[in-house]
Image (cartoon, rainbow, N blue to C red):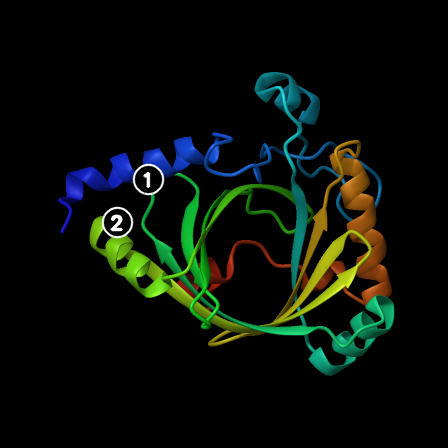
Amino acid sequence: MFLPRYRALICSQFTRFSRSSSWSSSCSQIAAAPPRRGFFAGKSSVNTRRDRDTDNRVMPSNVEIKAKVSDPTRFAARAAELSQSEGTIIKQHDTFFSCTQGRLKLRDFMDQSGQLIFYERPDTDGPKLSRYSISPTSDPPSLRTVLSDALGVKGEVRKERRLFLIGQTRVHLDAVEGLGNFMELEVVMRPEQSVEDGQKVAEDLMEKLGVSKQSLVTGAYMDLLLKGL
């Protein structure tokens, strides 16, 4: 078992790897979005051009939104109509580890596959840019044991996710154990798009799906569970 004084060091290594192209190319610079008209005026902004100049490569990013869903059946019907599919059911067991910067979680798909994910994003109730790194694993239980010993477990989230693909957006309808029903939008940004472009896509899709600004929530599911919400 690792000594406690090594925990911060291990977290910092994951953070360093997340900024390195050798660990994953799926990173994006987190920041706050410029003021704009609509639901989310005054949200965060990011200088994606500076990111590209710094790393000499285009870094992919997502603009994300999370909201509470009061009628999952109705939401699923709208999402199915827009995506022209019934969606894909995915079971997920996420284990969050203690980390001094950002969030580190192991996602177990319950089929002998999983992903180790490090990410950073602001806790705001509108569209937000997420920077992340992902490493696949074929043995989630063993990796969970090692990271639990090294870092300690912050908490766990179990959910059944129904995934719809609408244009450039991943639409999630989540039934989260202990919390209820939620939806997440992940607008997969194209290199030429700005954060405002991603916000516009998210706002338009929210309206089509019948998601109101009053239903928006902040933080990750883990945060909501820890708060007892």
* Residue 91 circle label: none
Foreground residue among 155 and 57 = 57
Q: Do the residues labelled 2 and 1 touch (CB within 8 Å)?
A: yes
Left or right: residue 204 versus residue 213 is: right
Please identify the residue farthest to the bottom as the structure is shown. Answer: 73
Foreground residue among 204 and 114 = 114
Q: What amino acid does circle 2 point to?
A: Leu
Decide if residue 71 is in sight here: no
Q: Work out how far the residue at label 2 is from the one at label 1, CA to CA, in angstroms.
A: 8 Å
Residue 127, position as x, y percentages in the image: 69, 47
Foreground residue among 221 and 26 = 26
* Residue 11 circle label: 1
Q: Residue at x 20, y 54 (%)?
A: 149
Residue 70, position as x, y percentages in the image: 68, 77
Left or right: residue 73 versus residue 12 is: right
Which numbered disc flags the more N-terminal residue, 2 or 1? 1
Please identify the residue farthest to the top as the structure is shown. Answer: 53
* Residue count near mark 2 (Cα–Cα under 10 Å), binned few <14, some 14–19, many ≥20: many
Decide if residue 160 is in sight here: yes
Dot 1: what SS? helix
Please say if 206 is above or below 93.
above
- Dividing the picture into quadrants, the one containing residue 101 is top left
Q: What amino acid does circle 1 point to?
A: Cys
Q: Name the residue under label 2.
A: 151
Please say if 46 is above or below 202.
above
Residue 26, position as x, y percentages in the image: 58, 40
- Dividing the picture into quadrants, the one containing residue 86 is bottom right
Q: Residue at x 40, y 31 (%)?
A: 16
Residue 199, position as x, y percentages in the image: 77, 44
Dot 2: what SS? helix
